[in-house]
Each structure stands twice: as structure tokens, then as C-alpha cells.
Amino acid sequence: MRRNFEFDGFSLVRWGDRFIDLHNAYDLESFGTDLAGSEVRLSFTRNEHAIDPDKLPSKVTLACTGNVRVAFNNLGEIAAPLNGEGIEIAYFDGGCDWLSFLDEAIARSQEPQGLHVSFINGLAVRIFCDEAALAVH
């Protein structure tokens, strides 16, 4: 999976010389696919917990493209809405069960299949893709 960012831990994105903490400094604004199902987008908005907010973008988007598929761990037990839930993002490969994921060092040595997105309430989403790109607004 090609990507224009790296994770420093989980949900802390290193993008060029910037560090963007998606877990603490941002809230998930939207999560979905386009109508064709060829792209998954996660959009985040900076929240009131951000340290040095003037140095952070107000919005961040993570777009997954190329051979996109989405899998969920167990939709029958998921409470909604998700917008108040903390989120963690990492990578996964074929050897990861639903409770495990890859950090950046392991992802560099073996090609991940996509992004693993987990919420505090137990929902886990796996986005299979060829490319993941971070954009700031």
C-alpha cells in the first residue's frame, strides 16, 4: 500500500515535517465511500483539545483508493453515533486478527493490505486499498 504519510505510534500521523494527532486533536467529521465505491474518505476537524491549534490544519482528510474494499468486525453490536468516539488508525495485513494491527516499523518491512480503524466502542473497520493519501485543508 502506497502512502504519503507515516504513523508515529497509532493515530499520530507524520506528514513531511508535521505531526497530526488524529486521536486527541481531531474529531471524525465523516467516514464513507463515493457512489462508485472506488474511494473511502475519513474527514477530521480540529477540536478544542489541540495543543498549538494555530500550527495545525483545521481539517484533515485521509483518502483510500485503488481496489477498495471495506470490512467491519461486527456491525450487530455497534452503538451509534460514532462522532463522540475516540479513534485509532494503523495498518493491517493478512496475519492480523481484529484485535491486532501493524505499527509503522513492521509496515515498512512487510506490505500492509490497508488501514485498520478502531473506535472506543469496539467497532473496527478495515479498509483494503492500494493507496492511502493524507491531505490538509
Image (cartoon, rainbow, N blue to C red):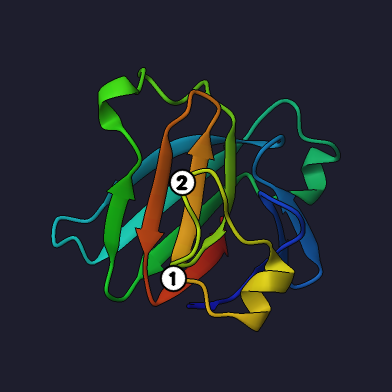
Q: Which amino acid, by three-letter code, is at mark 2?
A: Trp
Return the x and y of residue 37 as percentages of the image width and height. 19, 60
Return the x and y of residue 75 as percentages of the image width and height. 28, 31
Looking at the rendering, in which quadrant would you find the C terminus?
bottom right
Question: Residue 134, relative to residue 83: is it above or below?
Answer: below
Q: Quadrant of residue 65?
A: bottom left
Q: How crowded is mark 1: few (under 14 residues within 10 Å), some or many (20 or more)?
A: some
Left or right for 43, reference 87: left
Taking depth in this image into account, of 99 and 68 the one nearest to the observer is 99
Q: Residue at x 38, y 20 (%)?
A: 81
Image disc number at residue 113: 1
Taking depth in this image into account, of 97 and 39 the one nearest to the observer is 97
Residue at disc 2, secondary structure: loop
Q: Quadrant of residue 46?
A: top right
Q: Earlier in the sequence, mark 2 or mark 1?
A: 2
Q: How crowded is mark 2: few (under 14 residues within 10 Å), some or many (20 or more)?
A: some
Image disc number at residue 98: 2
